[in-house]
Each structure stands twice: as structure tokens, then as C-alpha cells.
Amino acid sequence: MAKLRNTLLIGASALMLPLAALAASPAADLDRDGQVTRAEFMAASDARFAQADTNFDGQLTTDERRALREAMKTTRALERHNRMDTDGDGAVSEAEMLAARDAREAKRDGKREERRARMTERFDTDGDGTVSDAEREAAKAERKAKRDARRAERGDADKPRGQKRGKRGARMDTNGDGLISAAEYRSGAEALFVRMDANGDGVLTQGEGKRRKRGKKRRG
């Protein structure tokens, strides 16, 4: 396979990362302890708003939000390329692509085993080394209780399901003026942190809060 050349050009604005990726962002982990606290998450959010607000008027327009999304796409594409380009020659060979695929699969399998081990350790109340149907139901009830608590904190517990989600920009624009102020952006970031903090401990660890992709088949 011919080598894929990297032709991506990015400016300073492309260094902005999406809110949902902050748990894995070294820039957000200010004290480099491997986790992102609420304070660190909000500091990174404020910095990103300042970078996106290119006309310095304290509000994000539709164009500024669109530019932010495009910059994030470019950044993620470049990061993926750099991770695969292990020899640093600016190109990704077939061998590097296959190695990256194998590494992803190994990482995914490892995480799956870790989740199973954690679940067994946490919910195997009778200590027989397995999680019974009753124990699984108890685990399910506990997760539901935590979800309900997070929804109540966000204030959308009584909303019809179809109204709970939507475009993030629309959710942040609470006064409906088509602009997102710094206060609205910060409020949205705080709500997102609560949503991502799955175990409610006030910190985000690597991968915590990432949404699972539905309908994606595993490669054979």
C-alpha cells in the first residue's frame, strides 16, 4: 500500500480539544496526576472559549462554533496520524496502519477484561467468582439510580426523552438568541462534567464518560 502523506496544516485554533475528550487530554490535566478534576476541566473549558471567541466580544457566533468544530476535526485527524506514524517520517506505512489496528484491538480487549473483573469484584456479593442474575440486576439498579441522580442534577429528569438531547449549541443557548455567552458555555461545560463523571467522584480518569458507538461491527 502506498504511504499516506500528511498534508494537514493547522493553526493555533486547531489546538482546541472537544469537551468530551478532556478526560484524555494532557493539557487539561494540569498537575499531571493522570486524572482531570472539575476545576481543571472548567479551566480548560474557559481557555477553549477564549480561543474560539475570535472577535473577543464574549459570545460565540454560529461561524465561530463552526470554526471550532472544524479545528477539532483537524486536530483529531492529525493526532491519529501522529500516533500511527511511529517512525516519525511524516507518512503512515501499511505496516504502521496494521500495527495501529492490532494495538487498538488489544487495548479494547484489555479494557473489556478489566470491566469484567471490576464488575465481578464489585457485584459478586456471595464471593463465588461469578456475577449471578440477581447480582447483575442489583448492579443494573445501582447504575440506574446514579443516572437518575445525574439527570436530576442537570435538571432534565422530568423532560420527555426526545427533549433531553439535541445539538449541544442549542442546549447551551439557553436564552435562544443564537449566541453562546461565556456564562452559557461554562454552564454547559459544568453539566457535561457531571454527565461524564460516571462514578460521581469529582474527577475524570482516562476514557471515563466516553459514549459507546452503536452499530459498529467489530472487524474479524
Image (spheres, rainbow, N blue to C red):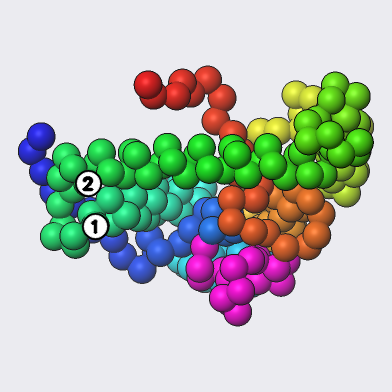
Question: In this rendering, would 104 be left or right of 36?
Answer: left
- Mark 2 touches mark 1? (CB < 8 Å): yes
Q: Quadrant of residue 79?
A: bottom left
What is the x, y in percent for residue 46? 61, 69
Q: Residues within 10 Å of mark 1 (few under 14, many from 20)?
A: some
Which mark is on residue 159?
none
Which residue is located at x 65 percent, y 71 percent? Answer: 40
Q: Check disc 2 and give the amino acid type.
A: Glu
Tell me if residue 133 comes above or below residue 97 in the rendering: above
Quadrant location, the C terminus: top left
Quadrant location, the N terminus: top left
Q: Check disc 1 and give the amino acid type.
A: Thr
State the CA–CA distance, disc 2 to disc 1. 7 Å
| Residue that carries the numbered disc 1 in the rendered image | 86
Which residue is located at x 34 percent, y 39 percent? Answer: 102
Which residue is located at x 65 percent, y 66 percent? Answer: 36
What is the x, y in percent for residue 152? 90, 43
> Which of the pair 195/124 is nearer the observer?
124
| Residue that carries the numbered disc 2 in the rendered image | 96
What is the magenta range? Answer: 25-41
Which residue is located at x 50 percent, y 68 percent? Answer: 26
